[in-house]
Image (cartoon, rainbow, N blue to C red):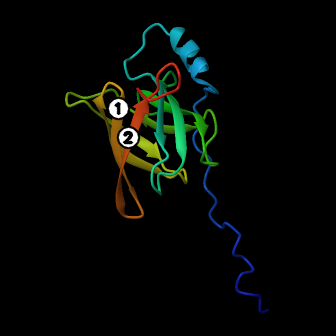
């Protein structure tokens, strides 16, 4: 059987897996603030953060809630980065974008980042300032520096 060479061009043989589910669904900054207000204690890292929108491959914009992991049997790290909104169709509200541990003596937090295609990559998250977290991932063999910025009450970067 001879088929035209483009017969299967639109078929995705290896679709992206579903991202891990956090068990939390936030659809707005206000919902995150309400959730955090109901917690007994808040870590300074908790809140609403945004990243992406730069040059490819960092085009998608992600807005995430960083919250304490209240399900230690389900997740391996102390904090979860839960999607509030994303321009990447692979991620929806409630999906886990990353997770990391409490800071060590050097201020570094070991963790896992879920790439745009949902593949996981181990990395080190570091709070460079109270409102700026940075980490490094490798995309197609190239180093990609990523910065996550905390949002203020109006949804703008600090």
- Say few, some or many: other residues with alpha carbon within 10 Å of mark 1 (under 14 / 14 to 19 / 20 or more): some
The x and y percentages for residue 67 are: 48, 23
Q: Residue at x 51, y 18 (%)?
A: 153
Helix or strand or loop: what does disc 1 sit on? strand
Look at 42% across and 64% down and name the residue there: 140
Q: Is residue 6 above or below residue 87?
A: below
Q: Is residue 105 left or right of residue 123?
A: left
* Structural distance between the alpha carbons of marks 2 and 1: 7 Å
Residue found at x 47% / y 57%: 56
Per the rendering, the mark at residue 147 is: 2
**Mark 2 residue crowding within 10 angstroms, few (<14) / some (14–19) / many (20+):** some
Q: Nearer the viewer, residue 49 or 10?
A: 49
Residue 82 image offset from top left, x and y in percent? 54, 32
CB contact under 8 Å: marks 2 and 1: yes
Residue 53, horizontal then vertical, whole percent: 49, 46
Is 95 placed left or right of 5 in the picture? left
- Residue that label 1 marks: 132
Sequence-wise, the earlier of marks 2 and 1 is 1
Residue 150, position in %: x, y? 43, 28
């Amino acid at each position: 059987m001879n088929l035209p060479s483009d017969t299967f061009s639109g078929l995705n043989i290896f679709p992206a897996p579903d991202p891990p589910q956090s068990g939390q669904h936030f659809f707005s900054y206000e919902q995150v603030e309400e959730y955090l207000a109901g917690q007994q204690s808040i870590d300074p890292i908790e809140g609403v953060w945004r990243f992406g929108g730069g040059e490819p491959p960092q085009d998608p914009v992600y807005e995430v809630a960083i919250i304490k992991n209240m399900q230690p049997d389900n997740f391996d790290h102390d904090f979860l980065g839960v999607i509030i909104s994303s321009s990447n169709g692979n991620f929806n509200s409630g999906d886990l974008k990353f997770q990391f541990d409490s800071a060590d003596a050097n201020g570094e937090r070991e963790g896992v980042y879920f790439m745009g295609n949902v593949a996981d990559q181990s990395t080190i998250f570091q709070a460079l300032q109270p409102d700026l977290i940075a980490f490094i991932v490798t995309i197609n063999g190239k180093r990609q520096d990523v910065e996550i910025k905390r949002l203020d009450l109006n949804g703008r970067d600090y």
